[in-house]
Image (cartoon, grey):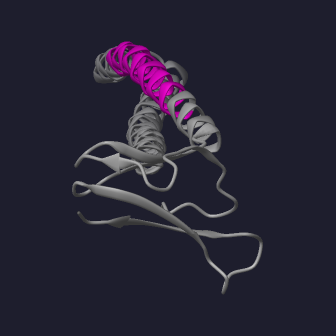
Amino acid sequence: TPPVGGMLRIVRMVPTGVAVKNGEVVMEFDPADQQYALEQARTELAEAEQEIVKMKADREVQLAQDTVDLITARFDVRRAELDAQGNEFVSPIDAQKNLLSLEEARRRLAQLEDDVKSRSVTSKASMQVVEEKRNKAQLAMQRAQQVIDSLVLKASVDGVVSVKENRDASGGMFFYGMVLP
């Protein structure tokens, strides 16, 4: 029998005594459960691929925003540095404000750089999770298709079909075999 857990239902079986040629279908099991599993895996694959597309687009938008934010923060630092360089020409209070502004601009830039690095790592990890989800769905599709393919039994040689009851098994099981000419 095919490598499927649970009950299998025969939907087609060549009767005893019929001559068959190599490659002809002699028995076929109902593939409904496996077709359902295949469609479910296809749906999961499509969802994962759409999620990957969305994540890539979101990442591009975030990278663009981060680039603008970093340029702005670097500009703010540079402007604060220039303001602080002219401290000898301003009052002590304004000079102190300039130094505090420079310190704050540098802090904001450092925080933003850390946030960008953190988002990058998180984004890569999230992408790997979704790619693994996609790989799992692809494997599930392949497995379901292999099982569906195995639900059709073909004669491996020319011969005559012989169906006999399997008296050792419970539940009316049958033994299906070929008698060679």
Residue 24: give x, y in percent of width and height: 31, 42
- Name the quadrant containing residue 12: top right
When the figure is inspected, residue 101 is found, relative to residue 35, above or below; the finding is above
- Identify the residue shown where x is 57% and y is 41%: 31
133 within the magenta span: no
Stretch of the chain drawn in magenta: 44-72
- Identify the residue shown where x is 45% and y is 32%: 112
57 within the magenta span: yes
Residue 173: give x, y in percent of width and height: 66, 70
Is most of the magenta stretch helix, strand or loop?
A: helix
Residue 69: give x, y in percent of width and height: 42, 17
When the figure is inspected, residue 180 is found, relative to residue 151, above or below; the finding is below
Residue farthest to the right, as pictured: 171
Residue 147: give x, y in percent of width and height: 46, 51
**Closer to the camera, 6 or 122?**
6
> Is residue 128 in sight in this rendering?
no
Residue farthest to the bottom, as pictured: 168
**Closer to the camera, 105 or 178?**
178
**Closer to the camera, 66 or 153?**
153
Taking the image as shown, residue 166 lies to the left or right of residue 92, namely: right
Q: Total number of numbered labels? A: 0
When the figure is inspected, residue 51 is found, relative to residue 141, above or below; the finding is above
